[in-house]
């Protein structure tokens, strides 16, 4: 477990230290308001009718009996969501709209077909049973490779493959082909002394957030509306809902509740437009809360995949070429994360020849949503499995092999740009030096290593910092807090202003109170909102110095800000005693009015993040049960603003990776219906499944941020799949090529593969 200490000598007074979380008391006492906690006078309750078929044409929908039921106030179907020009002009918005409510076809088990708003949930459920839908059941496909076959059932008659010259003008399930890389891979493989290629498969995994989706919508008589919802991006919710409902964006205000988990799964809309249109139709507030069954059947997991990898290396351990083909299914609509998987696949290494081909495929599954480094964990599982196997084939230590080929500052990335300052080598060196790496293993035990990468994003961000009369600060940000960002914003604002951490209060402002903010995703918030917070605080310091100058009667450029106070500088140095932030704030009304700082930016320079994971596992050869004995995470955070939160993010990503590797997957029957839509059958790890997870933070400052910050939330889920698979391979002498590694699957694998894969 991490020690309660700073991770390294720290030049900052607030940043990099451990503080109480600002939302902690409200959450443990039940005062925090989550998505389902909001209510309104006269509120109606809504339920959604969902398709029981994986693929079916909707011949007709008869809602007359439901409408006649006492207590039913509004019903909506596809006819209440017309394709207005603004929606049709945007392909992704059209897909979201179709996902919100099916039109001519239901495309997956759980696809919304109609919705009812009634005086209570019981009446709403009864009304759903009275809606008559005439379905023509169609052939379905849920497997990515089967969906690519010439004889596969077609989901969309209009879909054509992008990225293929001379592609046939006929319907297909292949939405796009992409290719990236550099160098001559054929020449690179010709130089290699050892070439290894393998085929891998991964199942679709859900984010597993505890809080189901919930929202409350209220449209008034003048056409303006409000939405309260659990989301990772309330500005996105506002824009999407307004366009789908045909409203002016300015007439819709959205407030983000506390969020009970998201991990990327709450970066899109599922129920909010339905509640909005029902409210407009009923003239009353409408609340929707998903059941757990609905969450699994109708919201996005990540993609399942089929991945081929080929790597060649010389006897001295130099990788000469690397190639991969990645097939990802993104559910019923285009947009799988295959492009990011292809970009991330070889991002940790620098062979002179790289080629990655990606296929984006549609299937009769729910529309995929982001899941913490979308696309990267599957690619890393495949690549890192071959990397580990190559290390043993060459007789090299797995970390030494990676160090020889690791991307460094100045390396050309596999996806194009040249890296600036990065910390992959530092994570590998720290992992090798850690005591976990030298623990002696017993029978049926193995050790696995894996590296991981994530891009990290910046994006559109706006913050406002207001100074209160007592010298405390109210900071308004527009990025929902899904991983402790409010604590980090408080720390950075306090650091800049020179005031105590607890003198800053950070709130998530609604869409009517702040400029536009992109969704909380891409590990962008501590970087981008933090950068904006720092600049807003610096703007406020300029105003504070100007006010102090006015109070002293000297020029503004003769004042500087030090340790939370204005002090005279230059010829006036020492002439006046410092003016504290509280003293200046108290006189603000007499020196020019309220004091504030704000900043708007479309941030770039986020800086990628790298990590190395080391896993020790034990396999019961009789049952196929895998036990994780030890788990080590070493990750570059650039600068850990809140070390406890960083460690929590690292551990959380590892836990989710353990579940994905060992247990979690969507299971469909022969009718394309999900058979495990709940936590009893879709099994996420519990405490008894997990080891103590050791963390070590590396800090290689990101030059794109004033404090060196990098995003950390997503990189931590990238290495676990590969690290665990490598540990299992070392333990049993059989290479896992399909996830999850369930006991029956592992027993079958051990029976089929007998050759040892790991060095003694």
Image: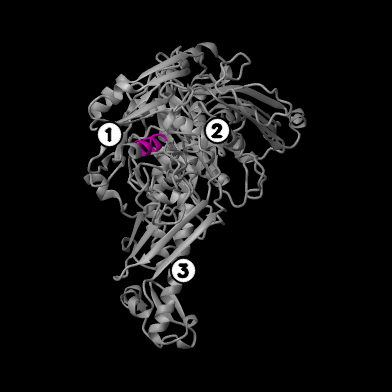
Magenta segment, prevailing SS (helix, strand or loop): helix
Residue 545, given in percent of the width and then of the height, sits at 43, 77
Q: Can you identify the residue that label 1 sits on?
A: 45
Of pointers 1 and 3, the one earlier in the residue sequence: 1
Query: Residue under circle 2?
Result: 335
Count up the numbered dots: 3
Q: Is mark 3 on a helix, strand or loop?
A: helix
Reading the image, the residue beneath label 3 is: 539
Between marks 1 and 2 in the image, the one whose residue lies nearer the viewer: 1
* CB atoms of marks 1 and 3 within 8 Å: no
Residue 613, placed above or below residue 564: above
Spatial distance from mark 1 to mark 2, Cα to Cα? 32 Å
Residue 201, quarter of picture: top right
Note whether 455 is above or below 51 in the view shown: below
Task: Kindly tell me whether residue 720 is visible in this rendering.
Answer: no
Q: Distance between the residues labelled 3 and 2?
A: 40 Å
Q: What stretch is highlighted in magenta?
A: 270-278
């Amino acid at each position: 477990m991490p020690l309660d200490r700073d991770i390294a000598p720290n030049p900052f007074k607030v940043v990099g230290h451990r503080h109480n979380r600002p939302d902690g008391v409200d959450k443990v006492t039940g005062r925090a308001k989550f998505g389902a906690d909001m209510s309104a006078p006269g509120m109606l309750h809504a339920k959604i009718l969902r398709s029981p078929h994986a693929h079916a044409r909707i011949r007709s929908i008869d809602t007359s009996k439901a409408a006649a039921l006492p207590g039913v106030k509004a019903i909506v179907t596809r006819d209440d969501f017309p394709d207005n020009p603004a929606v049709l002009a945007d392909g992704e918005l059209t897909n979201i709209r179709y996902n919100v409510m099916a039109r001519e076809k239901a495309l997956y088990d759980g696809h919304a077909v109609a919705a009812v708003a009634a005086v209570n949930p019981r009446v709403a459920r009864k009304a759903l049973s009275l809606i008559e839908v005439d379905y023509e059941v169609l052939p379905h496909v849920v497997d990515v490779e089967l969906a690519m076959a010439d004889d596969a059932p077609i989901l969309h008659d209009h879909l054509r493959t992008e990225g293929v010259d001379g592609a046939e003008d006929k319907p297909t399930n292949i939405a796009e082909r992409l290719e990236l890389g550099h160098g001559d891979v054929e020449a690179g493989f010709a130089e290699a002394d050892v070439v290894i290629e393998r085929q891998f498969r991964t199942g679709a995994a859900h984010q597993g957030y505890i809080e189901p989706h919930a929202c409350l919508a209220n449209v008034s008589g003048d056409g303006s509306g409000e939405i309260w919802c659990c989301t990772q991006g309330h500005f996105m919710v506002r824009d999407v809902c307004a366009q789908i409902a045909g409203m002016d964006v300015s007439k819709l205000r959205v407030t983000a509740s506390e969020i009970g988990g998201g991990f990327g799964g709450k970066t899109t809309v599922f129920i909010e437009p339905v509640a909005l249109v029902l409210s407009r139709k009923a003239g009353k507030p409408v609340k929707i809360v998903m059941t757990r069954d609905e969450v699994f059947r109708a919201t996005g997991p990540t993609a399942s995949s089929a991945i081929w990898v080929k790597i060649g290396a010389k006897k001295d351990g130099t990788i000469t070429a690397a190639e991969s083909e990645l097939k990802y299914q993104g559910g019923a609509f285009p947009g799988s994360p295959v492009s990011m998987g292809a970009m991330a696949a070889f991002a940790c290494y620098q062979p002179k020849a790289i080629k990655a081909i990606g296929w984006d495929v549609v299937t009769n599954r729910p529309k995929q949503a982001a899941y913490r480094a979308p696309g990267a964990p599957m690619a890393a599982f495949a690549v890192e499995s071959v990397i580990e196997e190559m290390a043993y084939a060459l007789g090299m230590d797995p970390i030494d092999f990676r160090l020889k080929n690791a991307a460094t500052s100045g390396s050309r990335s596999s996806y194009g740009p040249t890296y600036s300052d990065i910390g992959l080598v530092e994570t590998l060196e720290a992992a090798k030096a850690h005591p976990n790496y030298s623990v002696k293993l017993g029978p049926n035990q193995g050790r696995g290593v894996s590296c991981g990468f994530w891009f990290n994003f910046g994006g559109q961000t706006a913050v406002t910092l207001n100074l209160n009369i007592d010298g405390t600060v109210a900071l308004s940000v527009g990025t929902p807090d899904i991983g402790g960002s409010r604590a980090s914003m408080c720390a950075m604002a306090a650091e800049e202003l020179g005031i105590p951490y607890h003198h800053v209060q950070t709130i998530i402002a609604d869409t009517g109170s702040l400029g536009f903010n992109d969704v909380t995703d891409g590990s962008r918030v501590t970087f981008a909102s933090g950068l904006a917070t720092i600049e807003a605080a610096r703007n406020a310091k300029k105003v504070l110095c100007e006010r102090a100058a006015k109070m002293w009667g000297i020029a503004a450029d003769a004042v500087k800000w030090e340790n939370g106070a204005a002090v005279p500088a230059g010829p006036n140095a020492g002439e006046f005693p410092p003016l504290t932030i509280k003293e200046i704030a108290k006189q603000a009304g007499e020196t020019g009015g309220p004091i504030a700082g704000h900043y708007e930016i479309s941030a770039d320079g986020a800086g990628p993040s790298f990590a190395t994971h080391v896993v020790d596992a034990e396999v019961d050869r009789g049952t196929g049960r895998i036990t994780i004995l030890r788990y080590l995470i070493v990750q570059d955070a650039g600068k850990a603003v809140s070390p406890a939160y960083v460690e929590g993010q690292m551990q959380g990503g590892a836990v989710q990776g353990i579940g994905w590797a060992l247990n979690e997957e969507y299971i469909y029957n022969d009718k394309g219906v999900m058979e495990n839509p709940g936590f009893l059958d879709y099994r996420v790890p519990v405490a008894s499944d997990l080891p103590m997870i050791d963390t070590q933070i590396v800090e290689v400052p990101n030059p794109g941020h004033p404090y060196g910050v990098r995003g950390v939330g997503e990189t931590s889920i990238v290495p676990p799949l590969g690290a665990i698979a490598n540990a299992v391979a070392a333990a049993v002498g059989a290479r896992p090529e399909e996830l999850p590694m369930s006991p029956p699957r592992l027993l079958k694998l051990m029976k089929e593969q007998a050759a040892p894969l790991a060095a003694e």
